Amino acid sequence: MAIDPPRSVVLNYDQDSQRLNVQLVEPAKLAPLLAGKFTVPILLDDFDFRLDDEFARRLGVAMLNAIALGQPEIKQYMTVTPDPID
């Protein structure tokens, strides 16, 4: 079975086309651009190493909120629950 190389994921909102774009980038090529930038670590231990549906939902909400900080026009499309759902 072939194994792909490690990749970083870049998510951005293109307001002109009103779409989210996901791009896969080699971590080594992205590293110089990220040097010294604000980083929010997500510790897997805080989630008991469970990358389940709720984790994915909360990660998605966090990504949309991060985009909305610089592009608040996307908020008009967001109807997400920020808190955990039981």
Image (tube, grey):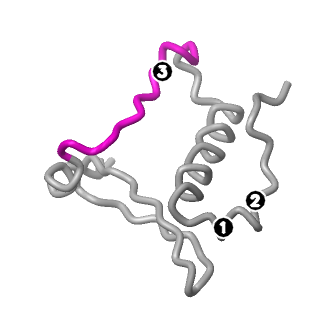
Q: Which mark is residue 78?
A: 2
> Eyeballing the image, is 75 above or below 35?
below
Reading the image, the residue beneath label 1 is 74
Residue shown at 63% from the left, 32% from the top: 55
Which residue is pictured at 47% across the width and 65% down the height? 12
Mark 2 and mark 1 residues within 8 Å of each other at the beta carbon: yes
**Amino acid type of the residue that numbered disc 1 sits on in the rendered structure:** Ile
Side (left or right) of 77 relative to 1: right
Query: Which residue lies under the disc numbered 3?
Result: 44
Q: Which mark is residue 53?
A: none
Q: Position of residue 23 (x, y in %)?
A: 39, 65
Q: Which residues are magenta?
A: 35-48
Q: Is residue 5 above or below residue 73?
A: above
Q: Mark 2 or mark 3, which is nearer to you?
A: 2
Return the x and y of residue 24 as percentages of the image width and height.
35, 61
Name which residue lies at 33% across and 41% down: 38
Q: Sequence-wise, which precedes: disc 1 or disc 3?
A: 3
Query: In front of the other: label 1 or label 3?
Result: 1
